């Protein structure tokens, strides 16, 4: 565990790969190679992240984001090198920046500036070398236009962010999320891309949620159920089971098999 007052808990998943969780059930990961380390996401804790990283690794560290949402990027300003998929960079000013600003204010934290002009753009098939291992980039459009999964073949790990949820549900109601038919097509393409990684451990952006009652471990079968759920919602054979307000917006929860989606009605198209 990290220090009791640090606001973070720590687990070594395998040699030189660490899972870090904060008070908000936000998960981030430090992957260390021989030459450099990669931080995947940052969470949104009030406490800085760098002291914990430096207790684990004293060499160069870059940041790569699974997507541009507040709870994954709040500590961007602690890193000199940041990578993000090009489609999230392109969508930043139009739709993602307002979402991040509202999330910051809603959480009671001071909004920060995220200098997209200095961000390294990622694309499908890119690799991030660390020395002795590298992480591949898999585009997983839906939760945001540029959501990605990072594949660590050396350790047989997939860092999935929020691409298909946490095992409890996937939020697809926010501005910038794909409509349901677009998300279904993205999931179909993603299933093909993920087949070579069958048997890998999937690590999401909120891994503690997968341990809640009724949640499911992230897996290829969950992604298959998510694609089927999209089809059933679109053809009207699956009805919502819960309605609630999220940030003043009415959302609906749908379930099928292992998958669950939280939607606005205007996303069902």
Image: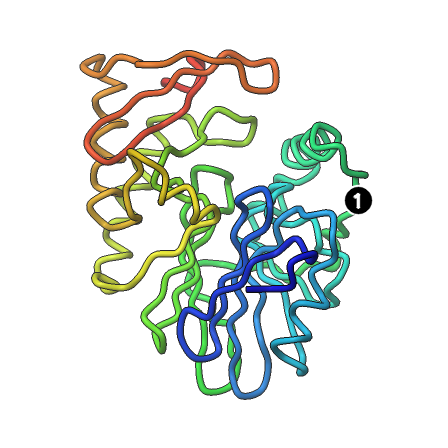
Toward which corner of the image does residue 38 lie, by quadrant?
bottom right
Q: Nearer the viewer, residue 4 or 138?
A: 4
Q: Farthest residue in the front direction?
A: 4
Q: Please give the name of the residue rendered at 39% of the width and 56% of the height, measured from the top-left corner.
A: 203
Task: Decide if residue 149 is on the left or right side of residue 96.
Answer: left
Q: How is the image coloured?
A: rainbow
Query: Residue 144 in the image: x percent, y percent?
Result: 51, 39
Query: Residue 32 in the image: x percent, y percent?
Result: 53, 78
SS at badge 1: loop
Mark 1 lies on residue: 112
Q: Please give the name of the residue rendered at 31% of the width and 61% of the height, measured from the top-left corner.
A: 201
Task: Decide if residue 36 is on the left or right side of residue 160.
Answer: right
Which image quadrant: the N terminus? bottom right
Q: Please give the name of the residue rendered at 66% of the width and 40% of the height, measured from the top-left corner.
A: 92
Q: Please give the name of the residue rendered at 41% of the width and 69% of the height, measured from the top-left corner.
A: 13
Labels in figure, total: 1
**Position above or below: 80 against 251:** below
Task: Decide if residue 191 is on the left or right side of residue 262.
Answer: left
Q: Nearer the viewer, residue 154 or 49?
A: 49
């Amino acid at each position: 565990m990290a220090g009791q007052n640090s606001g973070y808990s720590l687990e070594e998943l395998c040699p030189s790969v660490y899972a870090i969780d904060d008070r908000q059930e936000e998960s981030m990961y430090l992957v260390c190679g021989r030459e450099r380390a990669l931080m995947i996401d940052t969470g949104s804790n009030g406490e800085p992240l760098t002291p914990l990283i430096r207790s684990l690794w004293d060499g160069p560290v870059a940041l790569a984001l699974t997507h541009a949402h507040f709870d994954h990027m709040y500590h961007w300003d602690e890193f000199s090198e940041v990578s993000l998929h090009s489609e999230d960079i392109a969508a930043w000013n139009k739709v993602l920046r307002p979402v991040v600003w509202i999330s910051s204010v809603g959480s009671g934290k001071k909004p920060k500036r995220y200098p997209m002009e200095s961000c390294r753009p990622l694309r499908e098939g890119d690799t991030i070398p660390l020395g002795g291992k590298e992480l591949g980039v898999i585009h997983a459009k839906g939760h945001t236009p540029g959501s990605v999964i990072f594949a660590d073949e050396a350790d047989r790990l997939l860092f999935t962010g929020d691409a298909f949820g946490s095992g409890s549900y996937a939020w697809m109601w926010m501005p910038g999320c794909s409509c349901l038919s677009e998300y279904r097509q993205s999931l179909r393409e993603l299933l093909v891309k993920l087949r070579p990684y069958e048997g890998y451990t999937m690590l999401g952006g909120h891994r503690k949620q997968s341990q809640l009652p009724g949640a499911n471990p992230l897996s290829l079968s969950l992604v298959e159920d998510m694609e089927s759920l999209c089809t059933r919602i679109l053809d009207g054979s699956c009805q919502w089971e819960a309605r609630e307000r999220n940030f003043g917006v009415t959302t609906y929860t749908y379930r099928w098999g292992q998958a669950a989606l939280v939607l606005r009605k205007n996303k069902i198209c």
